[in-house]
Amino acid sequence: MAKDDLIGGSIWEEYSQKVQDLMNSPQNMGEITDEEAKAQGGKLIVADFGAESCGDAVRLYWVVDEETDIIKNAKFKSFGCGTAIASSDTMAELCLGKTVDQAVKITNIDVEFAMRDNPDIPAVPPQKMHCSVMAYDVIKAAAASYKGVDAESFEDEIIVCECARVSLGTIKEVIKINDLKSIEEITNYTKAGAFCKSCQNPGGHEEKEYYLVDILKDTRAEMEQEKMSALADAKIAGTESEMAFDDYTMVQKLKSVEAAIDKDIRPMLVMDGGNLEILDIKDTDDGMTDIYIRYLGACSGCASSSTGTLFAIESVLRETCSPKIRVLPI
Amino acid sequence: MRVYLDNNATTIVDPNVFAEMEPYFVQSYGNPNSLHQFGSESHPALRKAMDQLYKGLNASDNDDIVVTSCATESNNWVLKSIYYDHILNGEKDHIITSEVEHPAIISTCKFLEKLGVNVTYLPVNEKGIIETSTLKDAITDKTALVSIMWANNETGMLFPMKEISQICRENGILFHSDAVQAVGKIPVDVQELDIDFLSFSAHKFHGPKGVGGLYIKNSQALSPFFHGGEHMGGRRSGTLNVPGIVGMGKAMELAVENLDFEKNNVRRLRDKLEDAILKIDDVFVVGTREERTPNTILVSVKGIEGEAMLWDLNKSGIAASTGSACASEDLESNPVMEAIGAEADLAHTALRLSLSRFTTEEEVDYAVLALRKAVIRLRSISSTFAHTPDWHESKL
Ligand SMILES: Cc1ncc(COP(=O)(O)O)c(C=O)c1O
């Protein structure tokens, strides 16, 4: 743990000078009236996003030239913390002179980047990243209002982590390709969940449609499913042995051992009036798979059952299933 | 001008307390348990400090006041040792607390829940305190402990201690109170109030940080939280924090001497500040003045997010606090505001101002000006506060 975490640093120390300056005197704060918009030769667009009860709310005013779609003026008002005010201000600044289509491409990451003093040092601490997300959402709302469409239509993929703008598709793909097993790993690979953490689990700062815990669980289940069907396909194709015994589930291991016994061992025992049953199968800490068996019929009293026969059974199973098998008669 | 209005977070060490502590750093620094002059020369001061603590809380000689490192430790000790002593053995399975306790209680209870303890978090009413009827309903024959704070750190609201104590007694249930925000602000008398355990912390009443205490009625059994050498009679091991104990004793003495000052003078300044705040449009203060500790105001200022308010106040040199979303690491809105069911819109607009006996009239007057300035500026930025252009002229 970083020493600063142990002391518990103040988030204010992590604000860039730009954020502090904009917080103290925002440049594009204000309202635009219909008359003003007309005088400036454009159409007035007013869009709201967020609510006081969520802790953040912003209103964006645009004057848009209807001939060229260019945003000639932009102002904001904001209920929110310092970061929210500074981000809204920067967002309004970034809209100026752009066409509506260009403006829709501005993301919270662009806004945050524009507020950096040093391109390598974030403008705000991680937990404040979400305060810049609104800036992006309100632009979409304004563009939707200008074009008379639904704001959702600008989003072509499902965004799970809004702070880092990571999509559902990316997260699933990264889990599958890298065989990720924990949320920390997902965060390390994609940055999703690194900032306000709302998307990690339910119960965070914001309610979400998708949470990393669920995505991880579902994707792992999908992977398991895919593995099973691959195994089934391999069986049909007769290339089963390419799948390592070690990766089998317990049931798969049992089935494979049963199959080998049925094929190569049982007929041999039955010839002598004996048989065997599998009692249990266990993976051990030393990496072996122990198979507990009980001899039946003639075998149960046979002298070689704990020597020669056992040796034969074990070598057949080691040959056909896995070299790590140990057979233990009970 | 710098004005400190965050005394519920911590307080200035009274210079008289500091003076009392000073000799125990570089002169009489011996370990009081050692058999030599260096060690034994701290004994008179320790004895005096213990007398001051007992007197301050009006504890009897049969009771224990064990010095700990802070109220967080005292709270953890009670809750976890009740678990070890009464729940782990299957005798009981239940603890009752409230949903507006300090994290030192809430987080500990959450931890105990993971170990299988049933915990009831009593809801609070619109004033931010529990209704005793809910306590009665929550009690079962497996309830081991009721732990309810004396005064809330956010709102200053005082809980109905007498009634809670009585209900616990009638049901034969142990009763603990986190009295951190009460000690030094209002009389806390452990004989007048029948209570088993009570936590307090020196830095909330002008003593040093890192020292607190747990009152234990009739020296009753409670497994130690810190095992080790036989310090504090074996109840809490660790070499005695001599300057800390001396400082806490003196701070307690001064705090109790100043209770009338607290009730009259601090209260008067608090009320003055509150009157000025209430002149602002669309503000809302939790609880009536009589129901609160004399130093605290929790106000919601419509249209202004808490951290933004702190930012502007800080620029003017005013130290205040908020539990609101953006100001704290965990991004949650003020839990007390949520618990008291204030309009959801207000949950992010909470501002806490807390005075002390060191707060002056000039400071309060200055704070009023700074607060107005912040309100005017931030409401002009706010998208959720619609006002007529001249509202501040007519209202401020
Ligand atoms: C009600 C309450 N309980 C407990 C504590 C914790 O006190 P300490 O920091 O001394 O452990 C505080 C202080 O913030 C408090 O206000």
Image (cartoon, coloured by chain):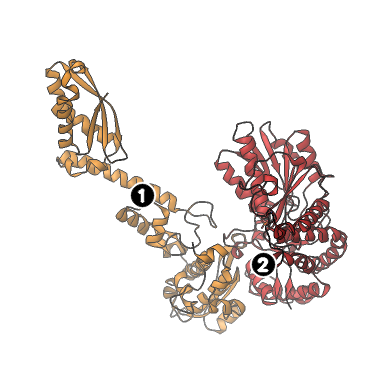
In the picture, which quadrant includes the C terminus of chain A? top left
Chain ID, mark 1: A
Q: Is residue B42 above or below residue B134?
A: below
Can residue B183 be seen in the rendering of this structure? no
The residue closer to the viewer here, B115 or A99, is B115
| Label 1, ligand 1: CB separation under 8 Å | no
Name the quadrant containing residue B378.
bottom right
Q: Amino acid at mark 2?
A: Gly
Chain with red colouring: B
Q: Is residue B79 above or below residue B294?
A: above
Q: Amino acid at mark 1?
A: Thr
- Cβ–Cβ under 8 Å for marks 2 and 1: no
Element class at badge 1: helix
The residue closer to the viewer here, B60 or A169, is B60
Same subunit, labels 2 and 1: the answer reads no
Percent x, y of residue B344: 65, 56
> Which residue is labeled 1 in the image?
A219
Percent x, y of residue B301: 71, 65
| Label 2, ligand 1: CB separation under 8 Å | no
Percent x, y of residue B255: 81, 60
Residue occupying the far front of the picture: B36
